[in-house]
Amino acid sequence: MTEAIWIVDDDRGVRLVLAEALRDAGLAVREFADVETLRKALKEGCPALLVTDVRMPGEGGLDLLADLQAQGIGPVIVMSAYTDVATTAAAYRAGAVDYLAKPFDLDKAVVAVQRALASEALPALAATHGPVPQPGLLGESAAMREVFRLIGRVAASDLNVLVTGETGTGKELVARALHDESARRGRPFVALNTAAIPSELLESELFGHEAGAFTGAIRRVAGRFEQAEGGTLFLDEIGDMPLVLQTRLLRVLAGGEFYRVGGRELIRGNVRIVAATHQDLDACVLTGRFRADLKHRLDVVRIELPALRMRRGDIPLLAQHFLASTAHELKLPPKRFSRAALKLITQRDFPGNVRELENLCRRLLVIAPGAEILPADLGATPASGSGGEWTDALREWALSALQHNETEIHARARMALDQTLLQAALQVNEGHRQNAALALGVGRNTLTRKLGASRTRKH
C-alpha cells in the first residue's frame, strides 16, 4: 500500500484546494475527477486513505465506498454538500470513518485525514436494508450539520444517547432518526413522556403490571420496556422522573432485567434507550434532583439540538416545508410566502422553536386569504434593527394593490404612514404634541394639521 492520499471529486476547485492543504501538511496526494479513473488506478495500487465526494456524474461515492469496503480497501472519508440524516447515516453504514460537510474548514479536513491515518480503519458496519424514511429533521446550518453527522455516526451502535435542547427543538425527531437508521429499525420505536404521567402510574407505564397488582389492575399489562423489545425506547423529559423511579431504571439499565409491578417473573429486555430533556442534568445532579450514576448510564453520547434562533438561516427552509406538508396533509390548496413575509419570519425569535414555527405555518395556511402569504398576514412582528423590513412590507402591499387595480394607492399609503408616525411619536412623548413634533422633525402646526386631517378621513 502506498502512502498517498487519493481524492476523487468532480469539482476541480475542491480537489485542488484540499490537495494543496494536505501537501502543505506533508502528505502525498493524487487527484481524480471521477470514479472510473480512480478504479483504473486501483489496478496498480491502493491509497493510504481515500477522500471521496458523494454525488458525482456516473458512479457515486457511496457505491465506491461499499465496493472498497468489500475488498478491504480503506479507510475512506466521505465529503458532501448534502448533509441530511439519510446521507450521513448511509455513509457511516457503508464504512466511512468520517464525514466532511461542504463547505468544510481546511484545517479540520487535514486533522480528519491525519486522525484517520493514525488509527486503524473502523470495521464496516453491516448494511441494513429497507426503504429510508422521509427525513423529519431539516437544516443546512453548521449546527444542524453537526447533529446529522452525530446521528449518522452513532445510529448503528447500541449506545444510549441523551438528546438535549430547548422545548420544541425536535428531540423526538432525533430519537426516531437514530432508530430508523439503526439495525433496530424493523423493531418497535416506543416513546414515553415521563413528565406527562403521574408519578404513581409511571412505574406501571414503564415496566407493566400483573392482574391484582393494585386497585383497577384487572389484567396483566405489558409496560413500555416490553413493548419496545428489540427496538428503541425514547424517554422524553427524563429530568422530571421521580428519584424512586430513577433508582429502578438504573437497575434495569445496569442488568437488563426487571419485574412487572406486582410480579415475580424476572423479565430480560433488549432495548436501546434514547433519553431527552430540556433541563441541565448536570445542575440537577448537583442539587440532588437527578442521580449521577443514572446520568452516566444515559449520557453515553450526547446530541445537543440548537435553538431555532441560533440557526435562523434554516427558518425559510423549515417554513416552506411546513407550509407544503400541511397543505398536503389537510388537502388544501398550496400557498407560498412572499419574500418580505419570509424575511419577517426569519427575524422572529420563536421561543417555542421549531414546534412554534410549524404551528404558525399551519395557522397561516388556513387563515391567510391569498395564495401568497404577505407580511400583513403575520400580525405583530418584533422589530428588527435592520430598518429595511417595513419597506419590504410596503413594497409587497403596493405590488398587491397595483395588481388588483386598487385606486388612490399613493394617498392611502401617505395617510397610513402619517398616522403611524404621529401615533408612535405621541405615545413615546405621552401625548405632548410639541415634543412629538420635535421628535419627528416637523412643526407643531404641521402635526396638528395632519392629526386633524387623519380624523377627518376616519369620519
Image (spheres, rainbow, N blue to C red):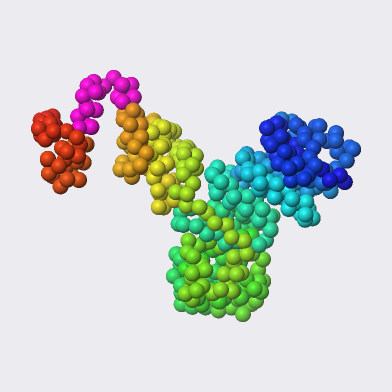
The residue that appears at 67% across and 61% down in the rendered structure is 158
The range drawn in magenta is 398-418
Viewer can see residue 83? yes
Which quadrant holds residue 53?
Answer: top right
| Residue 163 position in % (x across, y down) | 55, 59
Query: How many numbered discs sit on the rendered protein?
Result: 0
Q: Does residue 379 lie above or below 154 as drawn?
A: above
Where is residue 29 shown, x and y percent of the image? Answer: 79, 40
- Give 149 or 132, whichever is nearer the viewer: 149
Q: Note whether residue 90 is visible.
A: no
Q: Please give the name of the residue rendered at 19% of the width and 39% of the height, measured from the top-left corner.
A: 439
Residue 158, above or below 217: above
Residue ID at (66%, 43%): 106
**Quadrant position of residue 327:** top left
Is 18 contained in the magenta span? Answer: no
Residue 231 placed where, x, y %?
64, 60
Q: Is residue 405 magenta?
A: yes
Quadrant location of the C terminus in the rendered image = top left
Which residue: 68% across, 55% down? 156
Query: What percent of the width, then of the height, locates residue 1?
Result: 87, 46
Q: In this rendering, would 243 be left or right of 352?
A: right
Residue nearest the observer in this picture, 341 or 434: 434
- Residue 61 falls in image quadrant: top right
Above or below — where is 277 with respect to 43? Answer: below
Magenta part, dominant SS: helix
